[in-house]
């Protein structure tokens, strides 16, 4: 596709079989999970049909083919992230397991009583709870980074929290609940200048803006396959090689060992030290195919398309009474979160489903953010490559009818 051309969402939609099975589906729940293009489905099926075997150490040709496919996926993902080394890419089951790995390996080895972990109020539970658990084990404490009136991180408050006791800062690339984009570059630079490590939850960022981990400057970056047009059951923790070299294993079993005896066990070098048991082989192949598919498109045009859909949706909301857009006063990704003055968001979501409009409702695993907002829940619409202006217009019409019925 020529660069700077309009993003061809209508044509791309044909690459997603789900819309053949559900031609009237208006799918605006992409922040929860994206659908999969044929390129991803074909890659997984081809692996199972032509190279299905366990990886590493096999003496037969299928084992070699499986290993080549799996390690090829690791290299492909490293390239996509602009990682310095392929062995900085660790396969996990998803973002949640990736953050738990960092917390249980790096955290337990490095945190001490009195150390501080900073996590913003924007964070998904997966970037709060693992740090709370490791803090209980190590004597460290977790402190929230407060938000400003616009719903984004308060820079002055963050700076005041960056004391000598801070060992790790946990930040989202893009809020899964409101789409708010924290000012990562200056925050990472400030944290590193204060001597802290930085972990970024990239689950909502990588599918839209992409990421260059070397340019970003963080120490850890976690993401899930299923939010970037790839399979479920696979994710990635990227970490700097020099950190991984000194991190102990988190889970024990096959694959992650050098030598085992009852006198003691020694462990493999990274990344294998952190991949106990049979890894998600076909899923890793599918994830690499998803990134291939994504990189074939004009990424700036894709982001512009998704942002235009969000803006079109929010412009249409202006004619409807009793709706508040959360985080509207700051930079956001292609996510719109709504609060309602007179109706419950669960009721709205159920009525919208009757019109074929799929949205997400609840606290979106962001309880502290909703407590800060003073809300029990919100309704979230999130946009992806295959969404169109027609989707937005149909969703707005369905929402207007729903609010009339519930009034």
Image: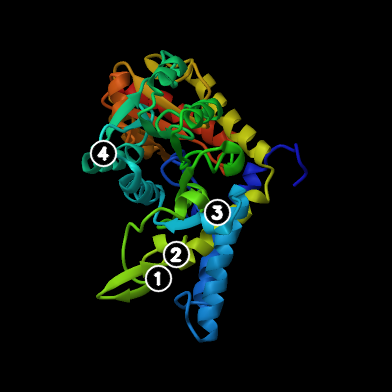
- Dot 1 or dot 4, earlier in sequence: 4
Mark 3 secondary-structure assignment? loop
What x and y, as percent, mark residue 129?
Answer: 28, 39
Q: CA distance from mark 1 to mark 3?
A: 35 Å
**Where is 309 relative to 103, above or below?**
above
Q: Residue 6: x and y, percent? A: 71, 37
Say whether marks 1 and 2 touch (CB < 8 Å): yes
Residue located beneath label 4 in the image: 135
Q: Residues within 10 Å of mark 2 (few under 14, many from 20)?
A: many
Whole-angstrom CA distance, mark 4 to mark 2, is 26 Å
**Measured Cα–Cα span from mark 1 to mark 2:** 6 Å
Name the residue furthest bottom: 60
Coloration of the structure image: rainbow
In percent of width and height, residue 282 lies at: 48, 67
Residue density around tag 3, few if under 14, some if 14–19, many if 20 or more, within 10 Å: some
Q: Image point 52% across, 67% down: which residue?
A: 70
Q: CA distance from mark 1 to mark 4?
A: 29 Å
Residue linked to disc 3: 16
Secondary structure beneath dot 2 equals helix
- Is any atom of residue 50 visible in this view? no
Q: Nearer the viewer, mark 2 or mark 3?
A: 2
Q: Secondary structure at mark 1?
A: loop
């Amino acid at each position: 596709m020529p660069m700077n051309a309009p993003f061809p969402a209508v044509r791309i939609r044909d690459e997603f079989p789900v819309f053949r099975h559900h031609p009237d589906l208006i799918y605006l729940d992409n922040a929860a999970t994206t659908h999969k293009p044929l390129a991803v489905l074909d890659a997984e099926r081809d692996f199972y049909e032509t190279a299905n075997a366990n990886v590493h150490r096999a003496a037969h040709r299928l084992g070699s083919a499986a290993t080549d496919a799996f390690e090829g996926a690791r290299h492909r993902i490293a390239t996509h992230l602009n990682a310095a080394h392929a062995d900085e890419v660790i396969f996990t089951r998803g973002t949640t397991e990736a953050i738990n790995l960092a917390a249980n390996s790096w955290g337990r080895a490095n945190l001490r009583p009195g150390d501080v972990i900073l996590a913003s109020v924007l964070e998904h539970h997966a970037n709060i709870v693992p740090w709370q658990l490791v803090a209980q084990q190590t004597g460290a404490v977790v402190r929230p980074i407060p938000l400003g009136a616009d719903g984004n991180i308060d820079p002055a408050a963050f700076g005041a929290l960056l004391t000598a006791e801070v060992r790790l800062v946990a930040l989202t690339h893009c809020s899964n609940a409101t789409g708010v984009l924290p000012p990562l570059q200056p925050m990472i630079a400030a944290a590193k200048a204060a001597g802290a490590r930085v972990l970024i939850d990239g689950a909502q960022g990588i599918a839209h803006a992409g990421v260059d981990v070397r340019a970003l400057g963080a120490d850890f970056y976690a993401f899930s396959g299923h939010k970037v047009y790839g399979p479920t059951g696979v994710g990635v923790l990227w970490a700097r090689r020099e950190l991984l070299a000194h991190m102990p294993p988190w889970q024990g079993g096959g694959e992650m060992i050098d030598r085992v005896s009852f006198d003691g066990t020694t462990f493999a070098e990274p990344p294998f030290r952190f991949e106990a048991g049979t890894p998600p082989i076909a899923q890793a192949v599918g994830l690499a195919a998803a990134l291939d598919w994504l990189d074939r498109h004009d990424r700036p045009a894709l982001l512009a398309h998704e942002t235009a859909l969000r803006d079109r949706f929010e412009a249409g909301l202006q004619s409807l009474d009793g709706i508040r857009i959360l985080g509207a006063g700051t930079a956001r990704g292609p996510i719109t979160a709504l609060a309602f003055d007179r109706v419950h968001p669960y009721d709205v979501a159920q009525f919208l489903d009757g019109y074929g409009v799929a949205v997400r409702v609840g606290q979106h695993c962001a309880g502290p953010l909703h407590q800060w907002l003073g809300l029990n829940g919100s309704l979230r619409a999130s946009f992806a490559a295959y969404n169109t202006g027609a989707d937005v217009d149909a969703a707005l019409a369905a929402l207007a009818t729903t609010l009339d019925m519930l009034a």
